[in-house]
Amino acid sequence: MPTREAQLEAKRELHKLNLVTIGEKRVAQCSSLELFYVMFIRAMMTNKNHILIDMPYSIINNLEDIDLLIENIELLNFQNKYIFILDTLNHNSRYNSRVLKT
């Protein structure tokens, strides 16, 4: 995907999460959650059908509510993508082997 087109698509997706303003920030000014969403959107824009999020609690500081994260991921509504969230060692009871398809 051309750079300009990718930037516009990323901005549309960030808008769905009410995070458009992070495009104006430097990386050091972003929270770990904001950086996660940017990384996630970039992953969703690839031609891969499967997205694996391995141990989100190690990526995102102060992640208190995994359900809110999952709701936001579902808002992005990318077609034909399977999202797997794995943290079987530490938080298996939280996920209940939950798999998302958007």
Image (spheres, rainbow, N blue to C red):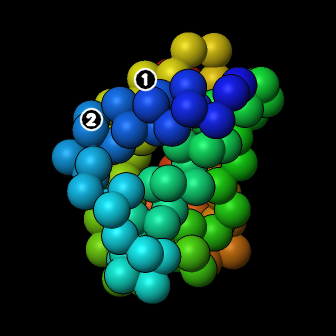
If you read the primary sequence from the N terminus, does the residue marked by circle 1 or circle 2 appear first? Answer: 2
Q: Is residue 48 visible?
A: yes
In-image side of 20 versus 28 (left or right)? left
Kindly identify the amino acid type of the residue bearing the numbered disc 2.
Answer: Lys
Quarter of image, res 63: bottom left
Q: Identify the element where label 2 is drawn.
A: helix
> Dot 1, crowdedness within 10 Å: few (<14), some or many (≥20)?
some
| Nearer to me, 78 or 83 | 78
Quarter of image, res 14: top left
| Residue at 47% in and 29% down | 9
Numbered circles on residues, count: 2
Q: Identify the element where label 1 is drawn.
A: loop
| In the depicted structure, whether residue 63 falls above or below residue 99 | below
In-image side of 64 versus 94 (left or right)? left
Q: Which residue is mark 1?
A: 77
Q: CA distance from mark 1 to mark 2?
A: 10 Å
Residue 37 in percent (x, y) is at: 46, 54
Residue 24 in percent (x, y) is at: 33, 62
Marks 1 and 2 close (CB-CB < 8 Å) = yes
| In the depicted structure, whether residue 72 falls above or below residue 30 | above
| In the depicted structure, whether residue 57 falls above or below residue 70 | below
| Residue at 79% in and 29% down | 48
Residue 83 in percent (x, y) is at: 62, 37
| Nearer to me, 44 or 73 | 44
Residue 68 in percent (x, y) is at: 28, 53
Q: Which residue is mark 2?
A: 16
Q: Residue furthest front?
A: 4
Q: Quadrant of the N terminus?
A: top right
Kindly identify the amino acid type of the residue bearing the numbered disc 1.
Answer: Asn
Residue 7: image tag:
none
